[in-house]
Amino acid sequence: MFNTTIRLTALAGLAAVFLIFSAVTPGLAGQAGRIEPSREVRESIQSLEPMPGMSYYGIGQRSSPRAILGVSGDFELQSSLWWKFDLAGTHGKVIKRSFADVARICATNPQGYTIVDGSGKKVGVWYTDRYDPSITLRDDGTMTVIIPANQYWSGEEF
């Protein structure tokens, strides 16, 4: 009986760990989808050429964002932490210089990613050198993107 109780408790514990892990694992939640590496996204952002149909957002300081998010016109971003900017405008040039400075100083290499929904449709782009987002796509056309707090640089509060 004692061994059975331990097994049942262990199974319940494993089930709880699995549920918690699946709830907080970075990636797409809501609709099934994925984030795919994309040279096209990296080159588009580094050359300040917006991809058609994308609205661009940054998170962090406006002069030095920690990540860039592009959201297709099919979705509305739900967050007060992200701020919208014109990738091809003056602010885009400031952001490009900031990413280049951080890459040089911290020996990082920003990468581009395509955000794809469960049907394989491109719904956004992601550009950063260090963050794993948690992305939720909802049936009502809203998108939420969260970067875990432990991934921010020290001293920043979001």
Image (spheres, rainbow, N blue to C red):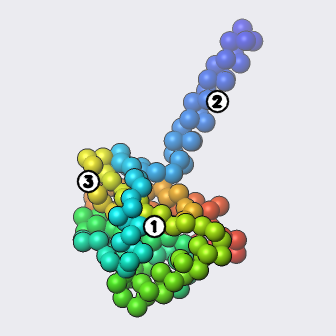
Measured Cα–Cα span from mark 2 to mark 3: 37 Å
Residue where numbered disc 1 is placed? 127
Measured Cα–Cα span from mark 3 to mark 1: 18 Å
Percent of width and height locating residue 77? 36, 68
Q: Nearer the viewer, residue 98 or 62?
A: 98
Q: Residue at point 60% right, 67% down? A: 108
Percent of width and height locating residue 68? 45, 71
Residue where numbered disc 2 is placed? 13
Instruction: Give the residue type at disc 2.
Output: Gly
Q: Can you tell which quarter of the image residue 107 is in?
A: bottom right
Q: How many marks?
A: 3
- Determine the secondary structure under disc 3: loop
Q: Is residue 143 above or below residue 155?
A: above
- Looking at the rendered image, the quarter that the C terminus falls into is bottom right
Instruction: Give the residue type at disc 3.
Output: Lys
Q: Nearer the viewer, residue 1 or 106?
A: 106
First of labels 3, 1 by sequence position:
3
Front disc: 1 or 2: 1
- Looking at the rendered image, the quarter that the N terminus falls into is top right
**Do the CB atoms of the residues marked 2 and 3 lie less than 8 Å apart?**
no
Residue where numbered disc 3 is placed? 121
Q: Is residue 80 above or below residue 148?
A: below
Q: What label does residue 55 carry, if any?
A: none
Q: Residue at point 67% right, 24% down? A: 10
Q: Nearer the viewer, residue 18 or 131?
A: 131
Percent of width and height locating residue 103? 59, 73
Q: Residue furthest right?
A: 2
Left or right of residue 4, residue 26 in this image: left
